[in-house]
Image (spheres, grey):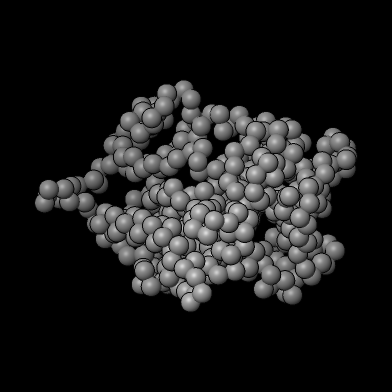
Amino acid sequence: MSYFMCYNNTERTQSELIARNFLYIMSNPISDLFNSFFSPKDTRVLGIDVGSSSVKVVQLKKQNGKAVLETYGEIALGPYAGTDLERATVLSADKLSEAIKDLLKESNTTTLNSGLSIPIASSFVVFIKLPTSEEKNFAEMVPIEARKYIPIPISEVTLDWWAMPKDENTVSEFQNGQKVEDDNMTDILLVVISNDALSKNKEIQKLAGLQTTFSEVEIFSCMRAAIEPTIDPQVIMDLGAGSTKVFVVERGILKASHVINRGSQDITLSISKSMNITFDEAEKIKIQQGIISSAKDNISEVSSITVDYILSETGRFILNYYKKSSKKISKIVLTGGGSLLKGLREKSQNSFETTVEVANPFSKVEYPAFLDEVLKTAGPEFTVAIGIAIRKLQEL
């Protein structure tokens, strides 16, 4: 069984379509679609987020200088691997392109002009320091310094980097009781992406017939859609199926990041094992009950084991950031499919004693007012796709 849902603004559909059956491969050749839909004057774009358990797509168009939502959809990847709907899986480029084509067909997209996500699992972000006086040599120095942080040959990865602006409000670090002056050092944001992941993305684009101009690590797409830039640091917790990504954003700039190797799928697996039921049955129970206590069973206790671990790791990450910067987190924003778990926001608020909100990425675009509640619920799952679509729209 496979899962698909969509909304099509052009048809003024007031409900989401949920079809639990296998989707068919697009009957029209991609070349025909390209000739019909894509042209230099095309003002429509796609943001495509290839996650571990599903693919999400958002179609926006530029209208009177605004980003307008036309359609969105999601399709589960489990069935393409012969496993359960919500399970995280690793698929070949052939299977992923098949899923994307199915999704584009069923969500009635009308362009192939797109951007594509790169999962954090195929990349990592690290912060390094280089002497400010050597700024003109950064291009040569970054790859050399990067070797200290990359566990595989540097020939197997692609590097991207950015010299971060000085923050006059940051307190100098202390080591062994001694103040460490770093005014003469520049912080470098280094992004490392597996060449295999880039090659796979290119193959997916080719097989799916996409007109893709960029691929972007999902963490940056998420930042673009989940929050508004503020002076005070904010934390984004992106709860995916297989992992949770946590990162600090300040003035719209990524300041720190951490990946926790547990996600919403681990909650489902715990319930399945505890109750000796199937994964699908456990997923339904998780959605219905979440981590809200019930006198009938101990589901909330079982679910909380994974949640407590994620919150504990996040708390440790936040504390480390405070020790380094002496800055308190002003707000935590929950996003990703796991962020809608019942009771999670309240539990997070109690754990961190700060404001905790659930992301509403659709607030970044225009859509019919009657869809407000629907999109607030669906929003967290589409944060990355919206972030990519917004960047793509800015290219027009």
**Image vertical order of residue 168 relative to residue 294, above or below:** above
Q: Residue 116, percent across and down?
A: 64, 43
Which residue is at the far bottom? 295
Left or right side of 7 for 338: left
For image coordinates 30% across by 62% down, the residue present is 327
Q: Nearer the viewer, residue 99 or 277?
A: 277
Q: Nearer the viewer, residue 94 or 34?
A: 94
**Image vertical order of residue 3 relative to residue 131, above or below:** below
> Is any part of residue 35 visible from this angle?
no
Asked which quadrant contains residue 113, the reply is top right
For image coordinates 48% across by 77% down, the residue present is 295
Left or right side of 103 for 276: left
Q: Nearer the viewer, residue 64 or 385?
A: 385
For image coordinates 39% across by 31% down, the residue present is 150
For image coordinates 68% across by 41% down, the residue present is 82
Q: Residue 207, percent across and down?
A: 74, 33
Q: Residue 293, percent across and down?
A: 47, 74
